[in-house]
Image (cartoon, rainbow, N blue to C red):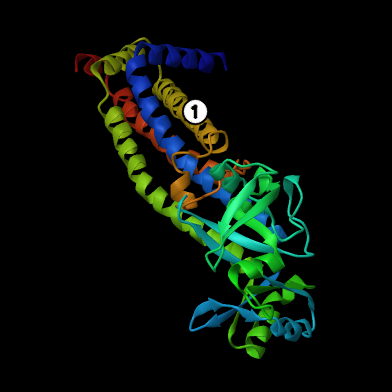
């Protein structure tokens, strides 16, 4: 054991003598690992965030289609769906989109009724016609707080003033950042929606295993509807995030390939000084296995240090600095996209896979060329 520690000590001393060269390699290596790890961390965190948000989503959302487009659905559809075995509460929902031409942002307006209250940081849900609750993104955009007023223009081009009674918490920003809550009756007046129709229906299903079966029954009974299960929405999130992260990984895999070429060139282009060092070590009695162990320690020190440093940088980039570089690419571009703190979610399988793809090739590129010189006659190596 002491002999191996001495070899490790010699390896570190040898690396210190070539610190500029090793520093350059570590810098490029770290940047490559940090980029790839950032993509993996961000994608996994967004998948977890979406799954957490959808925990409180309806088991089924039923929309009406007209000529292939989402249309208003009659409230009487809710009565027909509620009669199906296994169906619990069926809640008609009213919502719509609003574009502010001055701020050039899109909002989502949702009508509130007796349904469960979303988490608010402060204040309360609107109760009268001229009250509203806002997501944090809207509050930051307009620079308003609870007690201030929000100006909106309705479908009849009337300017309306709403008192802000509540603000959503940052923890719900993925869902509520661009959301404005109004009383359902007021929202119907705002969009001029008839009382007999709703935007969609939220369906409660007692047995999760029967969601797909009930969706087929609803589609058969009401052919102009489109039932969407919670798991379908989650699968869509997974597909979108995997697709975007896959594109990014494909792009940055070229950086990994370029680094592998750099590492191989560095290793195969072993300097005369390193060759002479190997020859001297062999001449004073070092075995070939000792030389290979020396180079193994050198390769492991560089690759492991770079991997750990790159992983730490990626972690800080995603979970402490909001993924400012890669966030817009993976999340998607939006006029008003939520700025929220991601909850750390790391897949250990991805970490080990990334370590295997970055550490092992570099060590191999370091040990193999050294083996060629270690098995050569020391005198020939020093002369060359």
Closest to the observer: 49 or 345?
49
Left or right: 306, with 79 as reference point: left
Q: Is residue 341 above or below residue 379?
A: below
Q: Is residue 380 left or right of residue 237?
A: left
Crowding around mark 1 (Cα neighbors within 10 Å: few <14, some 14 to 19, many 20+) is some
Name the quadrant of the N terminus. top right
Please give the name of the residue rendered at 40% of the width and 37% of the height, measured from the top-left corner: 361
Nearest to the observer: residue 47 or residue 269:
47
Residue depicted at x 58% and y 66%: 96
Counting the numbered discs, the total is 1
Q: Which quadrant, please, contains the C terminus?
A: top left
Residue 162, percent from left and from top: 65, 54
Indicate the secondary structure of the residue bearing disc 1.
helix
Identified at 33% across, 36% down, the residue is: 259
> Which residue is the site of mark 1?
309
Residue at the left extreme of this rendering: 384
Tell me residue 367's x, y (percent).
38, 29
Q: Is residue 356 visible?
A: no
Examine the rendered structure and indicate whether residue 360 appears above or below residue 51: above
Evaluate whether residue 46 shows in this view: yes
Query: Which residue, as the protein is rendered here, is positioned at the far front?
Result: 158
Q: Is residue 322 left or right of residue 284?
A: right
The foreground one among 154 and 179 is 154
């Amino acid at each position: 054991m002491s002999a191996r520690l001495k070899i490790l000590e010699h390896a570190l001393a040898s690396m210190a003598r070539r610190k500029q060269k090793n520093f350059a390699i570590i810098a490029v290596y770290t940047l490559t690992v940090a980029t790839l790890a950032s993509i993996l961390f961000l994608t996994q965190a967004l998948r977890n965030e979406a799954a957490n948000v959808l925990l409180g989503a309806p088991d089924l959302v039923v929309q009406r289609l007209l000529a292939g487009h989402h249309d208003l659905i009659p409230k009487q559809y809710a009565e027909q769906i509620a009669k199906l075995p296994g169906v619990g509460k069926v809640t008609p929902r009213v919502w719509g989109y609003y574009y502010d031409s001055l701020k050039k942002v899109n909002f989502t307006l949702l009508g509130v009724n007796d349904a469960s209250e979303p988490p608010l940081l402060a204040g309360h849900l609107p109760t009268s016609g001229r009250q509203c609750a806002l997501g944090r993104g809207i509050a930051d955009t307009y620079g308003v707080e609870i007690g201030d007023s929000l100006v909106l223009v309705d479908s009849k081009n009337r300017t309306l003033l709403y008192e802000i009674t509540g603000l959503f918490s940052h923890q719900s920003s993925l869902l509520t950042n661009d959301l404005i809550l109004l009383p359902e009756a007021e929202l119907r007046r705002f969009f001029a929606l008839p009382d007999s129709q709703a935007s969609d229906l939220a369906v409660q299903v007692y047995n999760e295993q029967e969601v797909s079966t009930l969706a087929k029954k609803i589609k058969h009974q009401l052919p102009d509807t489109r039932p969407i299960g919670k798991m379908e929405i989650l699968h869509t999130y997974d597909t979108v995030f995997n697709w975007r992260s896959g594109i990014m990984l494909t792009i940055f895999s070229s950086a990994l390939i370029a680094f592998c070429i750099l590492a191989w060139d560095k290793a195969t282009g072993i300097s005369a000084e390193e060759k002479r060092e190997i020859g001297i070590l062999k001449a004073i009695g070092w075995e070939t296995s000792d030389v290979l162990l020396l180079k193994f320690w050198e390769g492991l020190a560089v690759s492991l240090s770079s991997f750990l440093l790159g992983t730490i940088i990626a972690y800080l980039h995603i979970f402490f600095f909001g993924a400012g570089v890669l966030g817009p690419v993976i999340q998607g571009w939006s006029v008003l996209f939520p700025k929220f703190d991601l909850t750390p979610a790391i897949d250990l399988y991805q970490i080990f896979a990334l370590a295997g793809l970055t550490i092992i090739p570099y060590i191999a590129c370091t040990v193999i060329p050294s083996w060629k010189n270690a098995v050569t006659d020391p005198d020939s190596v020093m002369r060359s």
